[in-house]
Image: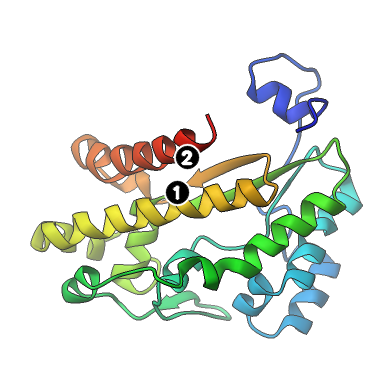
Amino acid sequence: MPQNRIMLDVLKGKAHFPPPLWMMRQAGRYLPEYRETRRRAGSFLDLCYDPDLAVEVTLQPIERFGFDASILFSDILVVPHALGRDVRFEEGRGPLLTPITAPQILALEGKVFHVNLEPVYETVRRLRAKLPDETTLIGFCGAPWTVATYMIAGHGTPDQAPARLFAYREPVAFQRLLKVLAEHSAAYLIRQIEAGADVVQIFDSWSGVLDDETFDLFCVQPMAEIVGRVRAVYP
């Protein structure tokens, strides 16, 4: 891995001024070129799973603004989708899933998980080949708690009450869901690194709704498992 990328140096603890710059959602609807690509793609998931279009969208803000890092264009919900769950995106409503039940959680398995995600890995490979050498490529996944909230409620909710209630009523199934998501998310990140991602990030967007005890149990511990599994392969 080349060592002349500003963001990689900063992540290793080296000071740099000005600091490296990238933006959350730097590829998105504020760009007219994104809106055109999105129109051509059809559905949002089709855009995520089409390497040609996903590469195009990921590169758009780099070509326009020259950010120091490029983040893979995808979505945290490709993980439950790859595990066989129904996931769709509707204009004006966002992600919609068929809510998962306790028996379905106990039956979850990922025999074709990586097969389903191969288009994402191909996108990463193509991006690393196309990006300037000095531009860091960021891969990512969603944290188990945040992904679980969507799988249980079937959509985003302000306080994540459906997931918190499910965790109380079905503790065994809920802990299994977090474990399955942690195991597969770690494998997903490892494959992204193998494909060319320089760094990876875990998004836990809904962690702020939890108290200290459940935050540790539902967020910190599953995330620590992901980090441990990834670092066992890529220290």
Query: Spatial distance from mark 2 to mark 1, Cα to Cα?
Result: 6 Å
Does residue 102 appear to the left or right of 198 in the view shown? left
Q: Residues within 10 Å of mark 2 (few under 14, many from 20)?
A: many
Which mark, residue 162? Answer: none
Q: Are marks 2 and 1 in contact (CB under 8 Å)?
A: yes
- Residue beneath the point at 80% across and 37% down: 68
| Amino acid type indicated by mark 1 | Ala
Across and down, in percent, residue 37 comes to 80, 75
Residue nearest the viewer, comparing 206 with 107:
107
Report the residue marked by disc 1: 186
- Residue beneath the point at 35% across and 81% down: 98
Does residue 234 appear to the left or right of 174 in the view shown? right
Q: Is residue 80 above or below residue 168?
A: below
Which element carries disc 1, helix, strand or loop? helix
Residue nearest the viewer, comparing 172 with 61:
172
| Amino acid type indicated by mark 2 | Val
Which element carries disc 2, helix, strand or loop? helix
Which mark, residue 230? Answer: 2
The mark tally for this picture is 2
Asked if residue 157 shows in the view, the reply is: no
Across and down, in percent, residue 144 comes to 36, 53
Residue nearest the viewer, comparing 117 with 174:
117
Residue nearest the viewer, comparing 102 with 123:
123
Asked if residue 85 shows in the view, the reply is: yes
Give the mark nearer the N terminus: 2 vs 1.
1
Does residue 118 appear to the left or right of 221 in the view shown? right
Which image quarter is the N terminus in? top right
